[in-house]
Amino acid sequence: MSAKKGKTISEKILSSKSGADAYAGDIVDAEVDYVMVNDVTGPIAFKEFEGLGCDLHQEKVVLVPDHYVPNKDVASAEQAAEMRRFAKKWRIDNYFEVGRGGVCHQVMIDEGFVAPGRLIVGADSHTCTYGALNAFATGVGSSEAAAVFAEGKLWFKVPESIKVSLFGKMHRYVMGKDLAIRMITDIGVDGANYKTLEFAGRGIANLPVADRLSISNMAIEAGGKAGIFPADKACMDFANKVSKGKFEPVSPDEDAHYLRELEYDLTQLEPMVALPHLPENGRPVSEVDVEIDQAFLGSCTNGRIEDLRVAVEVMRGRHVAPSVRMIVVPASTRIYQQAIKEGLVEEFLRAGAFVSGPTCAACLGGHMGVLAKGERCVSTTNRNFIGRMGHKDSEVYLASPAVVAASAIAGRIVAPVSMEG
C-alpha cells in the first residue's frame, strides 16, 4: 500500500484540530477556536443552545450585533435585546455593543480572534474572510453554532482544495476585489462548491493584507467552503501585531494534492464590475456604461481603512455627481476612528458623501441605503442578487472602492483612471 501524499493547508489545520490524520473527504470532529454569531443568527443559536441544558464554552463565543444596528425597527431591537440578555446571563466577555464593535468579520480581526492555524466558525457565510490570515474559517448554521457553544467542537468534512497561483503585481487602482470578481466570473458561483480556494505563488507578496481579506471574503460567492492564504511575512507581521494568544502558521506540503489549479497574472488584471444579478457576471469596467443613483462604500468586503484611503485618493478635490447619493460606512469602530484621525471622513463630507458609524447597513438591504424600484447602485459589497439591496426591480453592480469612488463622481460606472488629470 503506497503512502499518502502531502497535505493542503485545510487538511493540516483540520488534522491538527481533530487529532486525526485527515485528508479530503474524511469526516472529523475538530476543536473550534472561536464561534461567532450576529444579531440575526444569534437569537436562533441561543434558543437551540438553551434547549440542550449544557454549560457554555464561554471563552470561545463571540457576539457581534451588526446587521440591523442601530436598530431600525421593533423586530431588530428585539433581536439585539436577545444578544444582550444572553451575553449577561452567560457572562460573555466577547460581546461588542453598538459603538464598540462594527461589522462582525472586521471585529473578529480587529480584536485579535483571527490568527494563522486557527479553526473558526461563524453563523454568517462570509466567515471565510479570516482565511486571509491563514486560518480555516467557514460559515455555519445557527444550530451548528449552538453545538459549538455546548461542545467546543464541530464535525467537518475535510474539503478538497483548488490551488490559485498568483504572479506579478497589480497596477494602480486595481484591487483584490477585481481579482475576486475575475476569479468568480471564470469558475462560476458554483465553481468551488464545498472546496477550499488555496492561494499560492510569488504574486501574493504583492497583495496587501486588506486585499487578501476581500478575496477570501468572496470565496463563498464561488461556493467555497474556505479561502486560505499562506502565512507569509505580511501575514505574520499583521498577526503578530493584532492577533491575541499563541498561534502557529500552516503551510501546504510540496506534494499536496489539488483538485485543479488556476493561474492569474496580476499585471494583466483590470478594474472589474459584476453586473446584476450574480457575482459571476463580471466585465471589465471599460465595457460597462451604466448611470447610477447610488454609490455604496463599506461592508465586510471593502470597509477597511485601506479601502477608504483609496476612495479618498480618487475623489479628493471633486464632488459627488448631483444625480448620485454616496454612502460611506467604515467596517468597524476602530476603522471609523482611524478615518477621522486621518481626515478621510472630512474629505468624504467635503465631496458630498454621507458617512455613518459601522454597520452592515445597505449591504443586505437592511437600512441606510435601501434601493427603490428601478434604481441602480454600484457597491463594494459582495452580493448583487435580485432584491439584495432593496426593491426586486433595483440593480446592484459590484466593484472595488476605487471604481465606486470614481463612479460616484462621474454619475456612471467608470474606471478610476478616468478621474486622473
Image: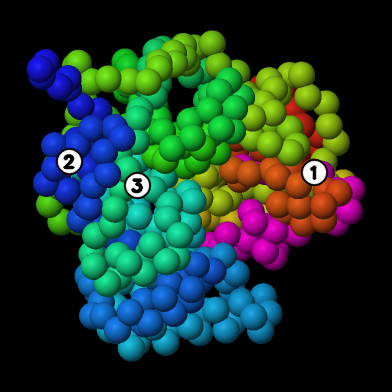
Q: Residue at x 82, y 52 (%)?
A: 392
Span highlighted in magenta in the image: 356-380
Residue 183 appears anywhere in the view? yes
Q: Position of residue 212 (x, y in %)?
A: 41, 34
Q: Position of residue 285 (x, y in %)?
A: 71, 23
Q: Residue at x 30, y 65 (%)?
A: 148
Crowding near the residue tagged with mark 3, few <14, some 14–19, many ≥20 C-alpha atoms within 10 Å: many
Q: Which residue is mark 3?
A: 137
Q: Is residue 190 above or below residue 52?
A: above
Q: Residue at x 50, y 67 (%)?
A: 41
Q: Is residue 35 above or below residue 295?
A: below
Tell me whether circle 1 and circle 2 mark residues in contact (CB < 8 Å). no
Ranked by sequence position, the earlier of labels 3 and 1 is 3
Looking at the rendered structure, which numbered label has been put on residue 385?
Answer: none
Which corner quadrant of the image does residue 389 belong to? Answer: bottom right
Q: Residue furthest front?
A: 1
Q: Position of residue 397 (x, y in %)?
A: 72, 38
Crowding near the residue tagged with mark 1, few <14, some 14–19, many ≥20 C-alpha atoms within 10 Å: many
Query: Does dot 1 land on a helix, a strand or a loop?
Result: strand
Crowding near the residue tagged with mark 2, few <14, some 14–19, many ≥20 C-alpha atoms within 10 Å: many
Ranked by sequence position, the earlier of labels 2 and 3 is 2
Q: Is residue 174 above or below residue 388?
A: above
Marks 3 and 1 sit apart, C-alpha to C-alpha, by 30 Å
Q: Residue at x 76, y 47 (%)?
A: 386
Q: Is residue 218 above or below residue 273?
A: below
Q: Which residue is mark 2?
A: 15
Which corner quadrant of the image does residue 168 belong to? Answer: top left
Q: Which residue is mark 1?
A: 395
Marks 1 and 2 sit apart, C-alpha to C-alpha, by 43 Å
The three-letter code of the residue at mark 2 reads Ser
Which corner quadrant of the image does residue 35 belong to? Answer: bottom left
